[in-house]
Amino acid sequence: MSLHLGRKTFGDIKNAGNVLTEEQVSTLLNEWVLNERLKLHMLQVGGLMGAWAKKVENLSETDAWRWKMAGLLHDADWDQWPDQHCKKIIEHLESLNIDPELIRAIASHGHIHFGVEPVTRMDKMLYAFDELSGLMHAYSLMRPNGYEGMERKGAMKRIKEKTFAANVSREDIRDACERAEVSLETLVDFIIAHQGSFK
């Protein structure tokens, strides 16, 4: 089953800046995503994207919400329509005249599958957080106190341990860090500091 999108451009430039409200995003998530574990993953990636946009990229609240929205919706169609993954949410957002940069970030979060290379900062950071967030969450579930007291050393050990969270692509994580020009250690530290609060 190919998920290749077969195109490189998304949305309409005249819709730049158009977003959904938090309430609209929440409604969409509740209607489209029935799997609570997947929903948590999306909330975590969305939270990381918003926090990174504000604290590292120094973006405005408005732009940080675009980043967060991309993270919140990147897997919205995976639960009920896995054979249309990415295609369905992209077409839905295009029909709502949503910001094209935000749509493109969603389209590029798995470039090997969807055929869209991450180019913008938003693209690259969504790609970077997606796989790593899931691995770090798995590590937190092993620990009695979750993220509290978690240290980089332990997380890095799990990342190197190929049998741990074996479905998480270490190659994608490495590739994403290189593209974003951010060290793995920096991302691990950021996730430890923030991800536990996104529920």
Image (cartoon, rainbow, N blue to C red):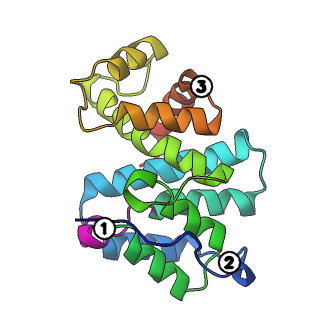
Q: Is 110 left, or right, of 32 in this rendering?
A: right
Q: Is 199 left, or right, of 183 in this rendering?
A: left
Residue type, label 1: Val
Q: Is 1 left, or right, of 170 in this rendering?
A: left
Q: Is 72 left, or right, of 2 in this rendering?
A: right
Q: Residue 186's image quarter? A: top right
Q: Mark 2 points at which residue?
A: 18
Residue type, label 3: Ser
What span is colored magenta in the figure? 74-84
**Closer to viewer: mark 2 or mark 3:** 3
Relative height, residue 154 to residue 85 (above, below):
above
Q: Mark 3 points at which residue?
A: 183
**How far across and down, in percent of the image, does residue 85 sit?**
33, 67
Q: Which residue lies furthest to the top in this view?
A: 153
Residue positioned 53% across, 25% down in the render: 184
Is residue 77 a member of the stretch shown in magenta?
yes
Which type of secondary structure does the marked residue at label 3 adopt? loop
